[in-house]
Image (cartoon, helix red, strand yellow):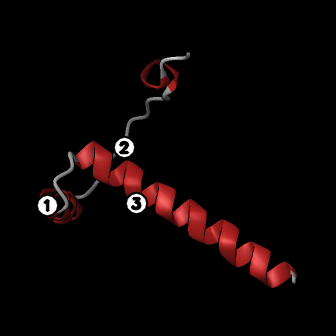
Amino acid sequence: MENKEKDKKQLLLRLSPSLWQELAAWAEDDFRSINGQIEYLLTECVKQRKKTRKNSEE
């Protein structure tokens, strides 16, 4: 079985201090790290985009 952590890509992300604070508070509310929260939000956005694109093709 492959180790998913080793397969993850890294990137440098610059955020404004105010956005960082909002994400940090949201992550804390959801019991996630900031990195985990960003990954969760991006995953949800990709799912929504796929769903929206699929519905528009019907």
x then y, percent, for residue 8 = 48, 28
Question: Is label 3 in a helix, a strand or a loop?
Answer: helix
Dot 2 or dot 3: first in sequence order is: 2
Q: Residues within 10 Å of mark 3 (few under 14, many from 20)?
A: few
**Residue type at mark 2?**
Leu
Which numbered tag is attached to residue 40? Answer: none
Which numbered tag is attached to residue 13? Answer: 2
The residue positioned 48% from the left and 18% from the top of the image is 3
Q: Determine whether, in the image, residue 14 is placed left or right of residue 25.
A: right
Q: Is residue 57 above or below residue 5?
A: below
Dot 1 or dot 2: first in sequence order is: 2
Question: Is label 2 in a helix, a strand or a loop?
Answer: loop
Question: Is label 1 in a helix, a strand or a loop?
Answer: helix
The residue positioned 16% from the left and 54% from the top of the image is 31
Distance, label 1 to label 2, CA atoms, is: 14 Å
Q: Residues within 10 Å of mark 1 (few under 14, many from 20)?
A: few
Distance, label 2 to label 3, CA atoms, is: 14 Å
The one nearer the camera, 23 or 51, is 51
Q: Is residue 38 above or below residue 53?
A: above
x then y, percent, for residue 33 = 20, 45
x then y, percent, for residue 42 = 46, 57
Q: Is residue 22 above or below residue 40?
A: below
Question: Is there CB contact under 8 Å for labels 2 and 3?
Answer: no
Q: Would you name the residue on which mark 1 appears? A: 21
Q: Would you name the residue on which mark 3 appears? A: 41
**Residue type at mark 3?**
Leu
**Residue type at mark 1?**
Gln
